[in-house]
Amino acid sequence: MRDSGLVHTLLRLDTLDDLLGHPVAGMSWEGFVIETLLRAAPERTQASFYRTATGVEMDLVLELPGNRLWAVEIKRGLAPKTEPGTRTALEDLKPDRAFLVYSGDERYPRGGGIETIGLRQLAQELAMLDAA
């Protein structure tokens, strides 16, 4: 289900504490981030995910107009960690830009070409691409 608000309602998760204590919290955040970024992305953006047979994955891969490739890993929480599989996925994909989206507001380089960024900031950046 793509609408996280509807999921929360159907599961009767009425408060933030209800949500955070439920196993759906991480998947709900990931779905919300993906939906938000897809709405902000320029027209003709192609979205997919990347996963190998060995479990290496990237949550969202955006093929943007102009042959640009952005890779997005999504983490819930304020102290996101980069998994070893993320770096392997980046080596495989060779994106133009790589982001680790988290629930905080600070933006900072993570090393290895990855930028940690809040959802609102990345959505704004995508929306500006459409305006350019």
Image: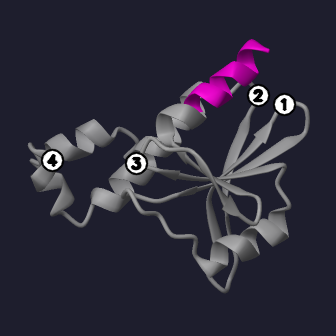
Q: Where residue 118 sits: x, y (%)?
A: 49, 42
Tell me the CA gap for discs 3 and 4.
Answer: 14 Å
Q: CA distance from mark 1 to mark 2?
A: 6 Å
- What's the residue type where badge 2 is placed? Arg
Q: Nearer the viewer, mark 3 or mark 4?
A: 3
Secondary-structure class at tag 4:
helix
Q: CA distance from mark 3 to mark 2?
A: 27 Å
Res. 56 in view: no
Q: Please give the range of residues in magenta.
A: 123-132
The amino acid pointed to by label 4 is Leu
Q: Are marks 1 and 2 in contact (CB under 8 Å)?
A: yes
The residue where tag 3 is placed is 103
Mark 1 or 2: in front is: 1
In front of the other: label 3 or label 2?
3
- Asked whether disc 4 touches disc 2, contact meaning CB atoms under 8 Å apart, the reply is no
Q: Is residue 94 left or right of residue 39?
A: right
Q: Which residue is mark 4?
A: 16
> Label 3's element?
loop
Secondary structure of the residue carrying tag 2 is: loop
The amino acid sitting under disc 1 is: Pro
Figure quadrant of residue 76: bottom left
Q: Amino acid at mark 3?
A: Ser
Q: Nearer the viewer, residue 70 or 23?
A: 70
Q: Quadrant of residue 49?
A: bottom right
Q: Are marks 1 and 3 in contact (CB under 8 Å)?
A: no
| Numbered tag placed on residue 65 in the rendering | 1
Choose the circle earlier in sequence order: 1 or 2: 2
Query: Badge 3: how crowded within 10 Å, few (<14), some, or many (20+)?
Result: some
